[in-house]
Image: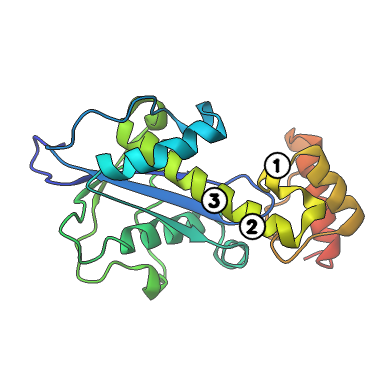
Amino acid sequence: MLAQGHRYIAGMDEVGRGALAGPVSVGVVVVDADTGRMPAGLRDSKLLPAHVRERLCRPIARWSVASAVGHAGPEEIDQVGIVAALRLAGMRALGTLRGAQAWPTAVILDGSHDWLTLRGGAADPESEPAREPAPLVQTQVKADMRCAVVAAASVLAKCERDAMMRQRSADYPDYCWSQNKGYSAPAHLSALRMLGPSPWHRRSWALPTPERGVADPLFEAAEVIRAEAGGQ
């Protein structure tokens, strides 16, 4: 991609997409032709223990030309849906780079679906990059394992979102977010059954059904939240 004339290339990755509570978060890391060897030990964030991820954040910041993390909260996920919320978080991450010399003209996304490019419909003006050209998006399956800049984005997003969930856990300790980060761990599901959802929970899933073979814990959690929301 550098050989094709792109001066700055970004890797982007998301975390929190499958969580029951908390934001969806998107990391962006920008590199250029002068970027050196990747930080030692850098891998997909899911393959690293928490202390190693946190130790990598500063080396990633020094290694990259620019980096940022954007978030879309539970209410926004409920309002626009998870895919649009991913885009909102991604554009917020890119928006942090707005006006910088390191604006990427190409983005590598982990996976096979381009959730960053707007296709029809109204957009949130706050999410649009002012005066900057929309970057070319290239998807790559398992890019977080194969591409250092995407792995770096996943580490930054994971560390920042985990820190947010630990902070929220102080306000809602019964859900054990400091341990499960808002995902469907047994303690989290148990608290949902007893207490119902908090304001930090998402309520807008397309609810699974047993006929579709969805795992029971997630189905039960969705049912709990649906009941507390009055069946909406």
Taking depth in this image into account, of 9 and 140 the one nearest to the observer is 9
Q: Quadrant of the N terminus?
A: top left
Is residue 153 placed above or below 93 in the rendered structure? above
Amino acid marked by disc 1:
Gln
The CA distance from mark 2 to mark 3 is: 10 Å
Q: SS at mark 2?
A: helix
Residue 193 is situated, as x and y percent measured from the top left of the image, at 89, 51
**Dot 2, crowdedness within 10 Å: few (<14), some or many (≥20)?**
some
Tag on residue 46?
A: none
Between circles 2 and 3, the one closer to the viewer is: 2
Residue 210 seen in this snapshot: no
The CA distance from mark 1 to mark 2 is: 12 Å
Is residue 19 placed above or below 101 in the rendered structure? above
Amino acid marked by disc 3:
Arg
Amino acid marked by disc 2:
Gln
Tag on residue 161?
A: 3
Q: Is 228 on the left or on the right of 199, as rendered?
A: right
Q: How many marks?
A: 3
Taking depth in this image into account, of 199 and 63 the one nearest to the observer is 63
Q: Which residue is mark 1?
A: 179
Taking depth in this image into account, of 208 and 109 the one nearest to the observer is 109
Residue 206 is situated, as x and y percent measured from the top left of the image, at 68, 52
Taking depth in this image into account, of 149 and 125 the one nearest to the observer is 149
Mark nearer the N terminus (2 vs 3) = 3
Tag on residue 167?
A: 2
